Image: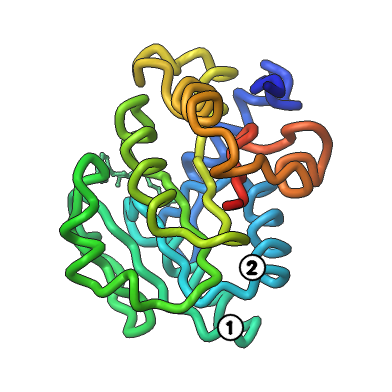
Amino acid sequence: MRSFTTAFTKPMLKGYQAGVMGYTYKGVRCLKSPIDIAIYLRLLWELKPRLILEVGSHSGGSALLFADLAEIMGLEARIISVDLNIPEGVRDDRITFLQGDVMNLGPVLEACGLDEIPHPWFVTEDSAHSHAGCLAALAEFSARMQPGDILAMEDGVLDDLGISERYDGGPNRALGEYLAAHPGVFEIAEDLCDMFGPNATYNPNGYLRKL
Ligand SMILES: C[S@@+](CC[C@H](N)C(=O)[O-])C[C@H]1O[C@@H](n2cnc3c(N)ncnc32)[C@H](O)[C@@H]1O
């Protein structure tokens, strides 16, 4: 298994994280690492997804960014964003905001007819970041995704930030366990994880390509 250590140094990460947490897109909070925004740009262009689904809407800024990127690139992609709470500040006909819990995504995904949406899919799990939540998302989406689809397991950088214990090990622990227990389901998309250097991303080993 590849190391989950990111390319970021501790002193650099402090300021970078402050920037991520304060970032806005069109005036709406958008909690994305700029390097990962660059990775998404390339990913979206090359994958040309018919579905962009995020779990974890927060203020709606990342869904808005995905909707704009899809439009600029001429993608015919549905944009779905799921959270415990639907954001109030973003109203956009291109985005379907749904209320749902990462621990029990089945009902909300079925209600929106997810399985009828054509592939390829780009799915990003950016919600609770708990070990259990990440495992639940991996189980749910692995059963629905098709070969070539991409799943981003966000924020394994919590380890390098020194706070993954709060998340019971978080994304990295979940990913390590899942990949070991389910060989042949996903491969780590090293072309994406390592685009700017080995795991120079907030999602170390977290870009997964369905096999
Ligand atoms: C890191 S923020 C999402 C950031 C957003 N994707 C962005 O880039 O701006 C995490 C979000 O996950 C949501 N969340 C927390 N636990 C959740 C759960 N069990 N199921 C669904 N969403 C959850 C929170 O309400 C919060 O809005």
Q: Mark 1: which secondary structure? A: loop
Residue shown at 55%/24% (left/top)?
180
| Type of the residue with mark 2 | Leu
Q: Which of pointers 1 and 2 lies earlier in the amino acid sequence?
A: 2
Residue shown at 20%/60% (left/top)?
86
Q: Nearer the viewer, residue 87 or 15?
A: 87
Residue shown at 50%/40% (left/top)?
154
Percent across and percent down for residue 166 are 35, 16
Task: Judge from the rendering whether residue 96 lies leftward or rightward of residue 170; answer left or right.
Answer: left
Task: Judge from the rendering whether residue 58 lies leftward or rightward of residue 9; answer left or right.
Answer: left
Q: Distance from label 1 to label 2 (Cα)?
A: 9 Å
Percent across and percent down for residue 146 are 51, 62
Task: Judge from the rendering whether residue 151 lies leftward or rightward of residue 94; answer left or right.
Answer: right
Percent across and percent down for residue 26 are 48, 68
Determine the image quadrant of residue 49. Answer: bottom right
- Residue contact between numbered discs 1 and 2, judged by CB atoms under 8 Å: yes
Q: Which mark is residue 44?
A: 2
Residue at the spot of label 1: 75
| Type of the residue with mark 1 | Leu
Residue shown at 19%/61% (left/top)?
108
